[in-house]
Amino acid sequence: MFAFAAWIIEAAGWRRCLIAFAAGAAGALAMAPFDIWPALAIPMTVAVWLIDGSCDRAPKKATGGLSVRHWRRFDLGVAGRRAFAAGWWWGFGYFVAGLWWLGAAFLTDGGKYIYIMPLGVIGLPAVMALYPAFGFMLARLVWTPGPARVLVFAAALTLTEWLRGNLFTGFPWNAFGMALGGNLAAAQLASIIGLYGLTLVAILIFSAPATLAGKPLSARAIAPSGAAAIALAAIFAFGALRLAHAKDAFVAGVALKIMQPNLAQDDKYRPEYKDEILAGYLKLSDLAKDADSTDVTVVIWPESAFPFILSRDAEAVAEIAAALPLGSFLVTGAARAEEDPASPAGGLGLPSSQIAHPIFFNAIQVIASSGVILDTYDKAHLVPFGEYLPFESILSRAGLHHFVHIPGGFEAGSRRRTLNVPGLPPVAPLICYEAIFPGEALPQEQGAPRPGLMLNVTDDGWFGLTAGPYQHFAEARLRAIEEGLPLARAANTGISAIIDPYGRILEQLPLGAAGLLKGSLPQPITAPAFARAPFLMAFLPWLAVVAAAAAALWLRRVRPWRL
């Protein structure tokens, strides 16, 4: 390992960039659908060595052989730039390998958007790579020889992962903690520390082997890997114990039916297929068999299920109502329109058939067998470029457009709120990628009771049979563990499922198949630690950075170790 580490540390130019890119790309193996969690050790270990090699001159020996005088003599400007560059190539490899499936969205609608495919497949990873680049540079500024540098690296990279998940609307997709979050036993730790806590732990564990490259190999060099092995064993033991004591309890008198139509994306948004699509939904939902049921049957359809505005189509609503047995309810994704408040008629409360200047919302609507729309939730966290175009007045001149077939795109809902469905406990609605944000899955309504169910409707058909839908599903499942709530998920092309508060999949429909999923509603459990204080846990990365920086500076000044 010493020779291999020295080769990476002393690499320069294109070879250094290629090593960083390849190491980062290997990290995608730790994410869904592969879930080879030990693979995260490759990018994390190499990352430490790349930062070791960011000195102003190539070291003569590997990591542990660097003298304190050498570490103190390097030029911070040069070292910072070298670390930033290595971090960017490392992150670029990770995001290209993990997000390549975004390109599938540009092939829909007859390849209408294929000319801007490089923006999704190359452009987004290039931007996302700035976060680990900043993390590498930040770590380099307080770098120290010895095992403490692993702590510095973990704290800096966790901080930049938190920033990635929160700045500019946030994009915490494939956070490094998902290497553990994708394994059911290891993911149980998220009930205490959430995704970003998992991220900190994962980086610490999987970067620890970097200290084994010192020569001669000392007890202090072995200690981080030993501690990592013990920590990993403790995590799996905790998860196994928690799952062993998990109880199977269900809400009495409630039956769930989740319909997965598996509609082709190019057909789903064509108004001429309206009647055929609705008839197919009703047939697949098999509603006639619910007529004699004594349970409250809740039928769930996926996001943006119709190529028309459901609330403005009385005929379609009447057809759905006629098919729903008494005591049954439909919860469906649907685009919704209302008069633009800025228009002359905005305050007149016109009926939907008379809307002249509509604005559109990506919504979930609850429909009773009487044909009445009982409740509506409008998506509050929209997807940039998918549902709306940022800086539209500028970017539209360059030929860029949002993907949804809605004039002007969607408007964001005013707030996250509880959805009321008769027969169900309070529902926390999550439309599409609203389910990927830790600590934000539940409505923050003062005085409102804790929800008893999370409902995620989505349309991952944009991404075909790629890794994307598997990654989205894994993110949503982790929210169930964090919040201690069951999750019902309806996806157009999959993966639809009923998941209990421990993240166990009770019922599931595979990706790329049409079908109807039937099951009972699991009961929620007592709110776990993370659910009780999600915003407190959000400060964990900041506290880790302060603690790591202080420890590293103290070790560098007072007790400079050599491995």
Image (spheres, rainbow, N blue to C red):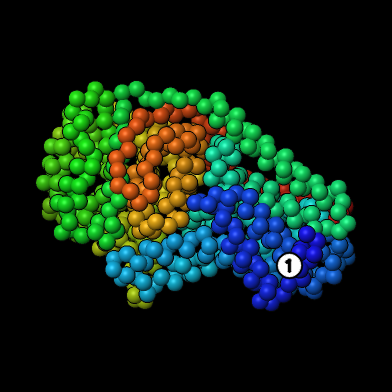
Up the image or down, 490 lies above or below 523; here it is: below
Dot 1: element: helix
Nearest the eye: 191 or 498: 498
Nearest the eye: 421 or 416: 421
Query: Which image quadrant is residue 301 in?
Result: top left
Residue at left offset 48%, top offset 28%: 525
Q: Is residue 39 visible?
A: yes
Number of marks in the rendered image = 1
**Image-based side of 219 in relation to 392, left or right:** right
Q: Is residue 549 visible?
A: no
**Image-based side of 169 in relation to 145, left or right:** left
Query: Which image quadrant is residue 183 in?
Result: top right
Up the image or down, 226 lies above or below 113; here it is: above
**Image-based side of 280 in relation to 533, left or right:** left
Point out the image quarter for the C terminus. Answer: bottom right
Nearest the eye: 84 or 11: 11
Q: Position of residue 135 (x, y in %)?
A: 64, 60
Residue at left offset 18%, top offset 33%: 288
Q: Position of residue 202 (x, y in %)?
A: 64, 48
Residue topped by disc 1: 8
Q: Position of residue 103 (x, y in %)?
A: 42, 65
Up the image or down, 451 lies above or below 268; here it is: above
Residue at left offset 79%, top offset 54%: 212
Q: Position of residue 187 (x, y in %)?
A: 56, 40
Estimate how packed mark 1 is, as few (under 14), some (14 to 19) or many (20 or more) residues with alpha carbons within 10 Å: many
Residue type at mark 1 is Ile
Residue at left offset 21%, top offset 30%: 290
Point out the image quarter for the N terminus. Answer: bottom right
